[in-house]
Structure formats: structure tokens, C-alpha cells
Image: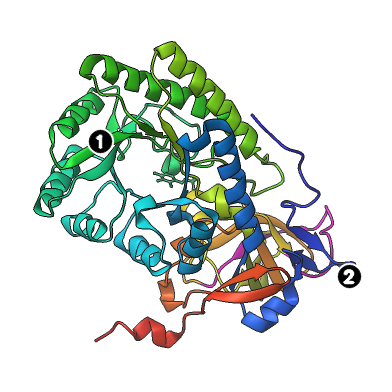
Amino acid sequence: MIITQSSPMLCDNLSRTAEGELTFAGQPLCALAAQYGTPLYLYDEARIRERCRTYLGAVRDTFGARGRVLYASKAASFRRLYEIMKEEGMGIDVVSCGEIYTAARADFALENAYFHSNNKTDADIAYAMEHGVGYFVVDNEEELYAIERIAGERDLRQKILLRLTPGIDPHTYAAVATGKVDSKFGSAIETGQAEAITDIALSLPHVDLRGYHCHVGSQVFDTDVYLRTSEVMLTFIAHIASTRGYLADELDIGGGWGVRYTEEQPTIDIARGIAEVGAHMKALAASLGIPLPIIAFEPGRSIVADAGLTLYTVGTVKRIPGYKTYVSVDGGMTDNPRFALYGSPYTILPVLGGEVPSDAERCSVVGRCCESGDILQENVPLPPMHRGDLLACLTTGAYHYSMASNYNRIPRPPVVMLKDGTSYLAVRRETPEDLTALEV
Ligand SMILES: *Cc1c(COP(=O)(O)O)cnc(C)c1O
């Protein structure tokens, strides 16, 4: 486990003014709430760029030109973010035509895009080929044959990686664990399906097998998970090289590096983690007698999570004597479904009033949807809250805007970027008119 010193606040881009007002990326939050309204998604642009540079620098130091970093854009996907990825020299993962289109609108060079998904339709495959998506990460045999057929119709040879399940249990939430043999994703090594799909890929004229991919899960704090995964994958590559004479040139070991949502969770030193995984891979490749393939990492959450913060305004405060206190905010599971889906922990702080005393009342912070499960967090220590007060939910840059919905016909919040003491709109607030715009 690799942990850096924990900062006095949850993330080092948070602070409080002398008067006790919370700041994010150096900017006091009340003025931003007044300017843009709430609920409001804020992003610290410098933090996003810093995280990209940390990954790219570590990968360059460890693997030289044979390393890649792909931003898993399902974590947060909007045009401005792809522009930043382009400027930073990142590759990207995409999982749908919508993400491909959005990246194309940012003039992102799609030859540096990797197309995931366990169920790509024929239309998805054709769309991605039309847009020149560089790599398909192929989940299963059926998809492989569809790619062969559609690439054949277009007279092209499509570069692919095969997604394998290495049989690693990352000890994370079941809903975000993907590397186990019974996963819905990929072809399992253990069952022989990984070898079988390799043989098929090698036999298809319009498919250019470049190597393998795996992704074992998300919110992983233990580097050992990646060490074990590397072992399984490199051993498989060596086995295929000796039995088929096919040497994979690329190994993508997925994303999943953990992020600190609460004080109890550690902070991962990404650069050290990559160096450690890299050293292990080099030793393994040498002992297996194979050259080290190009190594790709696909971080999503750890690029954007702590670059994000959501601001809410408190509405109804309901005290049920002898039971609990509900503090309702003007957002909820529509802008953050992660507590409802996974019971995910979050840190929620009042914007004004300074540090929360340790004996503060524990409240349930809930949303405005007609749904009892519309909860943002339980047991949040808060000073007495009143209608109109502001609350900040921290670490909301990943899987919030991208998972937001219009349940109850609630328009989605805007996305505002903070940069060098100023702010600008990346995505405007949805309006009720937007919600009916599709109706004919
Ligand atoms: C979700 C996903 C990622 C990113 O995971 P994070 O936990 O956000 O880093 C990377 N690769 C694949 C294939 C994924 O599905």
C-alpha cells in the first residue's frame, strides 16, 4: 500500500478563508453559488492537468516511449474535458457513440481512442470505424466476428486488443469488480476462452490483433492487485508466444486506482505505484523470456475525482425527535446516484461557519426526489442548518455529471471550470425547455 501524507483537509485544493468560508481551487464558494446557482458542479482545471501530468510523467519515466495513459472518459465526459486531454497528450477510452461524438467535437485525434463496451452493436462498430477510432477493445467472439465483417465491408484492417478476465478479485465493491472469471466483461483465461478468442483473432484478415486488455475493478488501493494482474497477463502473453508464435505488442492493464473520499481513506502516490508496477513487469518479462509490451494505463476516477466538488443549497430541515435529522438539498440522486447505487462514502461540509465541531449533530443529507433512497450521505456531522445555507459535497469529479439523470424531470446542473482565480462555463444548466426539446 502506498500512501502519501494526508493533507489537513480532505484534498489539498480545499481551504477555508480567515472568516471560515470554504474555498476550492483558491476560490470562495459563496460567490460561485451566487453567480451560477445551485446545484453546481465545479472542476479545478489545474488539478485535472496535474493528475494527467503525474500519470504521463510516471509512465514516461518507467516505460519510456512504450507507455500510454488513456483517460477513461466514462468518469466524466464533456467537450471541454476532451480538449484538456488533447492538450495534455492523453489517449482516451470511449464506450459509446455519444462519447466518440463528444471527443470528435473537441477535435480529439481519435486514433488515440480505445473503444470499450461488452456489447457494441453493428451500428456502434460502423460509427467508430467511420470516425477513425484507433483501437477496439474486443470483449467477446461475437463482437470479433462483427468487427471482421464490418471492417471487411470497408476494406480496412482494424487494430484491436482482446479484453481478458485474469481472475483477480480486487476486494472492492461487487458492482465495480470486473476482473473475476464470472464477470460480464471479457474472455476468461481460466476457462480457455482467452486462448480460443486469440486463435480466432489471429485467423481474421481484417483484424489486427495488437495485444491484450484487462481491468480488474475500481477504487483499488492496493498495488498488489496490479502486480498480480501483471503476472497473470504477462504469463498468458508468454504462453501464447510459445504455443502460437504470436507475441503481443501491447498490454493495457486498465484503470481503477483509488481516490480519497473520506478522511479514513488513504491517498495513493500514483507515480510510486506506477514505478513499482513497472519494475515488477520488467522483471517478470525478463524471467518469462519475452520483451516487455507497450504498457497502457486507463485511469478515470483518479484523474478527475478530487478535481470536482458539488455545491448545494439547503432547503427543508426536518428533525424527527428521538430518530434523526434530515437536511434536504436542491440536488440528490439525479446529480449523484452513487450513494443510492453503491452506498459510496462522501465528505459533506458546510460552506460557511468554519470547521465542524466534533460533537456536531449527525444528519442524513438527502435529495429532492420522490424516492426514499435518494440519499447523498448518512451520519454527516453538521452544525444547525437552515434553509438557504450552502453545503459542499467533496470529490465529485468522477461518475457524477456522467451518471446524472433527469429523474423526476429535474434539469441537470451546469459544469463550471475554475482556473487561475477565474471561472467559466463548460456545460450550461439544463432548463425545463431542454427536457421537452426531444418531444415531437
Ligand atoms: C471504468 C473503467 C476504467 C476506469 O476506472 P477508474 O476506476 O475510473 O479508474 C478503465 N478501464 C475500463 C475498461 C473501465 O471500464
Q: Residue furthest right?
A: 18
Name the residue located 83 percent from the left edge and 52 percent from the top edge: 358
Three-letter amino acid code at disc 1? Leu
Query: Residue 88: x, y in percent?
Result: 54, 55
Is residue 384 or residue 11 the one in the foreground? 11
Please determine whether, in this image, residue 132 is positioned above or below residue 169. below
Please determine whether, in this image, residue 243 is positioned above or below residue 48. above
The answer to whether one can see residue 372 in this image is no
Query: Residue 89: x, y in percent?
Result: 51, 53
Numbered disc in front, either 1 or 2: 1
Label 2 sits on a secondary structure element that is loop
Relative to residue 100, is residue 64 drawn left or right?
right
The answer to whether one can see residue 432 in this image is yes
Say which residue label 2 marks: 19
Q: Count numbered badges in the picture.
A: 2
Say which mark, if any, is on residue 209: 1
| Secondary structure predominantly adopted by residues drawn in magenta | loop
Three-letter amino acid code at disc 2? Glu
At label 2, counting other C-alpha atoms closer than 10 Å, the crowd grade (few under 14, some 14-19, many 20 or more) is: few
Instruction: Using the rendered view, name the quadrant where residue 408 is placed.
Output: bottom left
Relative to residue 272, is residue 370 drawn left or right?
left
Name the residue located 68 percent from the left edge and 65 percent from the top edge: 392
Specify the segment rendered in magenta.
350-368
Residue 360 drawn in magenta = yes
Is residue 215 or residue 148 the one in the foreground? 148
Query: Residue 170: x, y in percent?
Result: 48, 31
Residue 223 drawn in magenta = no
Instruction: Using the rendered view, name the quadrant where residue 223 is placed.
Output: top right
In the rendered view of the protein, which quadrant contains the N terminus? top right
Asked whether mark 2 and ligand 1 are closer than 8 Å, the reply comes as: no
Label 1 sits on a secondary structure element that is strand
